[in-house]
Image: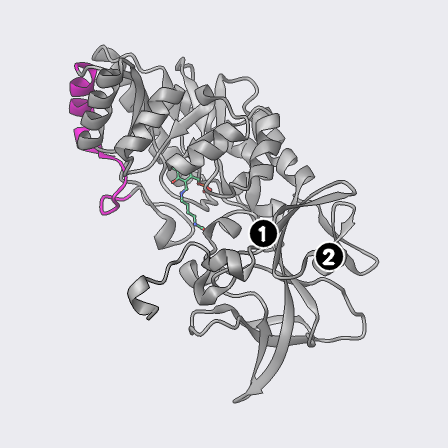
Amino acid sequence: MHHFDYRGGELYCEDVSVRELATAHGTPLYIYSTATLRRHFRVLSEAFAEQNCLIAYAMKANSNMAVLTTLANMGSGADVVSGGEMRRAITAGIPANKIVFSGVGKTAIEIRDALQAGIHQFNVESEPELKRISALAEEMGKTAPIAFRINPHVEAGGHANISTGGAEHKFGIAWHEAKAMYERAQKMPGISVVGVDVHIGSQITDLTPMRLAFTKVVGLVRELRDMGVPISRIDLGGGLGIPYKSGETPASPAEYAEMVRDVVGDLDVQLILEPGRMIAGNAGIFVSRVEYIKERDEREFAILDAAMNDLMRPALYQAVHELLPVTRAEDRQSRTYDIVGPVCESTDRFAKGYSVQELRETDLVAFMSAGAYGAVMSNQYNTRPLCAEVLVNGDQAELVRRAPTFDEMIANERVPEWLKS
Ligand code: LLP
């Protein structure tokens, strides 16, 4: 469910015309809907209302400060994977005790900052990392609450590149080493063992692999408790898929919650969830303008002013984002295009053989479901500025990130003196 709809043939985000936003702020442009963000957060919180549950929004999906503040105001926590994300979360008003820190390569500086801030939990992914956290915590006179991210050896996810739970992936502690690791961790200074963490992949639309992984985790928690390891939290990671095309029906948050309840049973634990895409994905669109229609070798290319650097998912994961005309024209038939950008790479293609209302130069088009892993993954390849972002709330709209100027883009670069004479 989202709040992007046609009114009289014009696409709207809540009560604001997408065309007006594109005219005011230029394209390419990311547009986010507050009502959709709030709705997604609320649906998930309500599904888990009866559990002791922390929703730690996986801000890697969309870490714009306005998006974060919207969620912080609703009581969201954050799953962070870098010192930069932690800084954003705290600046957005997310209390440190609602922050969990994930990721395979936490640096000493990041660990110190997190200990200083007093975060809720470190999700530890290896023994060397545990040792580093222990040493730093001891040095600072702090105690680090830790969970091990266990690799349950369950494959899942919408694409091979976003699956993380298999033996060949870099993520987590091997299943068969988990218990020994917990025993060692318990004896280490500066460490307080609190939880078990798992995250098997992203854009998971069928709950079966999650059920399998979570069942293994619950079994492990019981065994650990029998060994005297006081596990009080289970972090189930993120991964719940969203509909990218109309008609797709991935498992709903309610079905997910039901499955979790069934698997966790009466185990007395705090649940931690790290949803990213489920919160932000369908709360954003990416708007672009058609520059040219090019016909060649019996193909038609719609060349946009947006490119792979702005929205990387199609190039990286062959993801297809539904493309809608911002203005519907009754008198135009559907035609088939290769939808491409101006970047000099063959991978700069959003879709191949895509059928959409006939497109003409200067038309505006909207890529749907672009709120997660869109703007955050963009880059400045070809010296293309990062896109502006707008947040809509009812009939209000505000630029929440402006595009940098070319001068700003090159301001941090230096030409050495020896090149100047
Ligand atoms: N927790 C951890 C430890 C993660 O690694 C991730 C995502 C999440 C939570 C959030 O997962 P979500 O609920 O969003 O599925 N760029 C890719 C997705 C990469 C996901 C990385 N980890 C894409 O555009 O599909």
User: Is residue 183 magenta-colored?
Assistant: yes
Say which label, 2 or 1, has the lower sequence index: 2
**Can the viewer see residue 158 in this picture?**
yes
Q: Quadrant of residue 148?
A: top left
- Residue for badge 2: 24
Tag count in the figure?
2
Dot 2 surroundings within 10 Å: few (below 14), some, or many (20 or more)?
few
Amino acid, disc 1: Ser
In percent of width and height, residue 264 lies at: 41, 22
In percent of width and height, residue 189 lies at: 19, 14
Q: Quadrant of residue 69?
A: top right
Nearer to me, 230 or 61:
61
Nearer to me, 233 or 403:
403
Q: Residue furthest front?
A: 421
Q: Is residue 268 above or below residue 304?
A: above
Image colouring: one colour
In this rendering, which labeled residue sits more in front, label 2 or label 1?
2
Name the side, left or right, on which 421 lies relative to 349.
left
Amino acid, disc 2: Ala
Q: Does the beta carbon at disc 1 come under 8 Å from ligand 1?
A: no
In percent of width and height, residue 22 lies at: 70, 59
- Residue for badge 1: 369
Assign ligand 1 to one image quadrant: top left
Q: Residue at x 48, y 38 (%)?
A: 59
Q: Residue at x 23, y 22 (%)?
A: 136
Q: Residue at x 60, y 53 (%)?
A: 388
Disc 2 element: helix
User: Is residue 389 magenta-colored?
Assistant: no
Q: Residue at x 81, y 70 (%)?
A: 330
Q: Quadrant of the C terminus?
A: bottom left
Q: Which residues are magenta?
A: 166-187
